Amino acid sequence: MPTPPKKGTAGALGADFFDRDVHDVARDLIGCTLLYEGVGGTIVETEAYEREDPASHSFVGLTERTTVMFGPPGRAYVYLSYGIHSLLNFVCEPEGEAAAVLIRALEPMVELETMRSRRPKARADLDLCSGPGKLTEAIGVTLTQNGARLDRDPFLLLAPEGKPPPVVTSPRIGITKAVEKPWRYSAAGSRWVSRPRPG
DNA sequence: CCTGCGATTTGCT
DNA sequence: GCAAATCGCAGGC
């Protein structure tokens, strides 16, 4: 059977990209372009969360909040952190599993002025998207996008145009369980990652 | 450069 | 009832 042509923009990442090991996805997302309503940039930092991972929301099993994580891959899992920040994750692995990649930092590339106006507290462009709560504020992602497909508007995810950058791993940030797992993935040497800097 | 703390809401025990 | 996948500000070195 010939492979049917893929719909959507050339190079756009579909559900098949996310239907595999969450660590492979987290690593391969570094260097990809993430746009939300035409605003965003290059992904430079992610973290992987597994089904049987004490640091993952999915560890407690299927609840109202974790329903999206247990659902099909290629969807957005957005939740409220510390009562204030919306954090954006990409659901991975087959339906019934529950793994997700947290998007932690972007290099701002498109619609810089829009992002600056949404984040007046950012003193420099380095502060626009250098954290999971910062980048959702900058690109405009909110809780209403929980469960939304990533392969259609208003999301646009593109594979790197050239060679993807080298990736370094380090321990995850802001968790209290499974703190030793090196499941934070960053573009090597990037100035756009969050604190503390890897390495 | 670093450390400490309050904001503010939800979800699970 | 409390901990939480964070951020920004204050204060000290």
Image (cartoon, coloured by chain):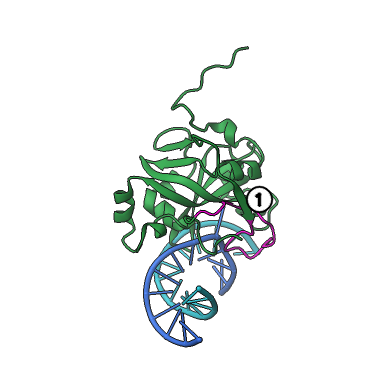
Chain colours: A green, B cyan, C blue
Question: Which sits in the foreground, A72 or A33?
Answer: A33
Query: In the rendered structure, which segment of residues is drawn in magenta?
Result: A170-190
Vertical comparison of A180 with A94: above or below: below
Vertical comparison of A41 with A5: above or below: below
Q: Is residue A116 one of those drawn in magenta?
A: no
Q: Position of residue A15 (x, y in %)?
A: 56, 32
Rate crowding at label 1 as few (under 14), some (14 to 19) or many (20 or more) other CA atoms within 10 Å: some
Q: For numbered disc 1, what is the local secondary structure?
A: loop
Q: Check the picture and name the quadrant holding the C terminus of chain A.
A: bottom right
Q: Position of residue A25 (x, y in %)?
A: 60, 41
Q: What's the residue at 38%, 48% (across, down)?
A: A139
Question: Which sits in the foreground, A188 or A114?
Answer: A188
The residue beneath circle 1 is: A61
Chain at numbered mark 1 = A
Amino acid type at image mark 1: Gly
Q: What's the residue at 54%, 64% (across, down)?
A: A196
Total count of labels = 1
Q: Residue furthest top?
A: A1
Q: Position of residue C7 (x, y in %)?
A: 43, 64
Corner quadrant of residue A1: top right
Q: What's the residue at 32%, 55% (across, down)?
A: A116
Question: Which sits in the foreground, A175 or A51?
Answer: A175
Image position of A107 (left or right of A169)? left
Q: Position of residue A45 (x, y in %)?
A: 53, 51
Q: Main secondary structure of the magenta part?
A: loop
Q: Is residue A183 one of those drawn in magenta?
A: yes
